[in-house]
Amino acid sequence: MKLFNTIVIWDCYVVAESSEDARKELLAAITEGEAPSEVVGSEVTREAAIRASWLDQRPFVAGEVSVADRAKIKGKTTTEIFQQLYTKQAK
């Protein structure tokens, strides 16, 4: 089990009357199945690389993660999971 920073980008152009309308149009297209322009998944190797907005959030867990591994990380934040996976735990 590893922790990945996964970035999905829908980089496009929208003709609209306002930026709010442009965002709404793109979100509707995404909901309808518009494919992203780019998808990148990079393993997090330094705790400092975790985005501030995700430090105290629980990350998504992919379907192939085992039941046993899910139990080990249940309810933990991204920071806590990083520390569990990548730092030596005090005994």
Image (spheres, rainbow, N blue to C red):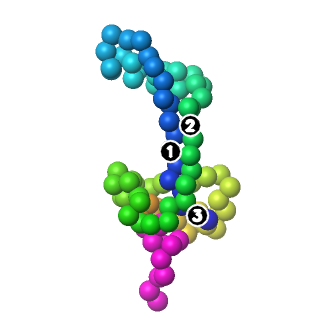
Q: Earlier in the sequence, mark 2 or mark 1?
A: 1
Point out residue 10 in the picture as x, y percentages from the top left corner: 50, 31
Q: Is residue 15 above or below residue 57?
A: above
Quarter occupied by the N terminus: bottom right
Disc 3 secondary structure class? loop
43 magenta-colored: no
Q: Is residue 46 left or right of residue 85?
A: left
Q: Nearer the viewer, residue 46 or 20?
A: 46
- Residue tagged 2: 38
Q: Which residues are magenta?
A: 80-91
Q: Are marks 2 and 1 in contact (CB under 8 Å)?
A: yes
Point out residue 42 in the picture as x, y percentages from the top left corner: 55, 55
Point out residue 43 in the picture as x, y percentages from the top left corner: 55, 59
| Three-letter amino acid code at the position of disc 1 | Ile
- Residue tagged 1: 7
Disc 2 secondary structure class? strand
Disc 2/disc 3 C-alpha distance (Å):
21 Å
**Badge 1: how crowded within 10 Å, few (<14), some, or many (20+)?**
few
Rendered residue at 58%/25% (across/down): 34
Q: Is residue 30 above or below residue 67?
A: above
Residue 87 seen: yes
Q: Nearer the viewer, mark 1 or mark 3?
A: 1
Rendered residue at 57%/41% (across/down): 39
- Residue tagged 3: 2
90 magenta-colored: yes
**Badge 3: how crowded within 10 Å, few (<14), some, or many (20+)?**
few
Disc 1/disc 3 C-alpha distance (Å):
16 Å
Please give the label number shown on residue 23: none
Rendered residue at 50%/66% (across/down): 45
